[in-house]
Amino acid sequence: MNPSIATTLRNITGAACLTTLLGTSLPTWAQTDTKEQLVVALSNPGKPGRVSVKLVGGSITVVGYSGKDVVIDATSHLGRRSSSRQAPAAANGMRRIETSNSFDLTANEDNNQVSIRTNSYKNPIDLVIKVPQRFSLQIGTVQNGDITVENVAGELEVSNVNGSIQLNQVSGSAVANTVNGVVKATFKDVATGAPMAFSTVNGQVDVTFPSNTKAALKLKSDHGEIYSDFDLATDKSPKKVTRSNEGGTYRVTIDDWTYGKINGGGAEVMMKTLNGNIYIRKGK
């Protein structure tokens, strides 16, 4: 119904300009700090949508609320990188000139699909995003931040590298993975028949499901233990052994995953960590 709207925020040498592209413009104002807000109106208010954002540096918090818009609060840590460097000595009589650090945030909306882009590769940008409760997410960051999602119902795809992931009182399904950090999730409701996955390398995996959840679990902790307060029916059959011959090289592979079912089984839920414990908790 509405055309695609692209909204761009730029802060260059202390001034900010908010421009709505494709013919519609908003007023320009001076910026005295590094915090700004974008309000993105949806083409179909009241219907499910999706937010997509990938950061290089910074944290992401997404909160479901009763409103109809997507509200983005952004804080840019301008100068974080340059302040941590030692001022270099003059080279051949020349001095280094400090360059400005721009703040660039873009939100594009099309049919309730909201895509957020930043220049967080220059300076970390922390995002706090409010979305209608029935919203799916594709979000990720690499460094300088954690990811938190609260009170959102949908398909949640969450990734981090150097930080934790925490999903609080969410509904639907989730795929959450990080490398250095804890993965923790608490579900109010689980989508029937939707596979899920939770993984990290250095950290624990801690997931709470409603007591009536039906799932087929695939579990692995190389240097940790697995705990559950569900009545978990584990597979007692011998480990599967696979033999192969590739170009004269013989290989024997033993499947060292633990398999089990809760409430008779259902869609597959994978949980994996290298260094840490796995906790499967029973909620209400």
Image: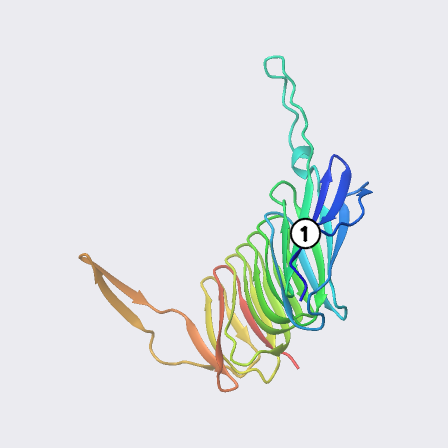
- For image coordinates 52% across by 86% down, the residue present is 263
Query: Quick one: 51 or 279, which is closer to the camera?
Result: 51
The 10 Å Cα crowd at callout 1, few under 14, some 14 to 19, many 20 or more, is few
* Residue at the spot of label 1: 22
Identify the residue at the far bottom of this view. Answer: 264
Residue 281 in percent (x, y) is at 59, 76
Residue 183 in percent (x, y) is at 58, 63
- Locate the C terminus and report the quarter of the image it occupies: bottom right
Identify the residue at the far left of this view. Answer: 248
- Locate the N terminus and report the quarter of the image it occupies: bottom right
Locate residue 236 relative to residue 124 in the image: left or right: left
Location of residue 88 by image quarter: top right
Residue 253 in percent (x, y) is at 30, 65
Q: Secondary structure at mark 1?
A: loop
Residue 180 in percent (x, y) is at 55, 54
Q: Is residue 271 above or below residue 139?
A: below
Query: Quick one: 229 or 68, which is closer to the camera?
Result: 68
Location of residue 157 by image quarter: bottom right
- For image coordinates 63% across by 19% down, the residue present is 89
Location of residue 175 by image quarter: bottom right
- For image coordinates 24% across by 67% down, the residue present is 243
Locate residue 150 relative to residue 211 in the image: left or right: right
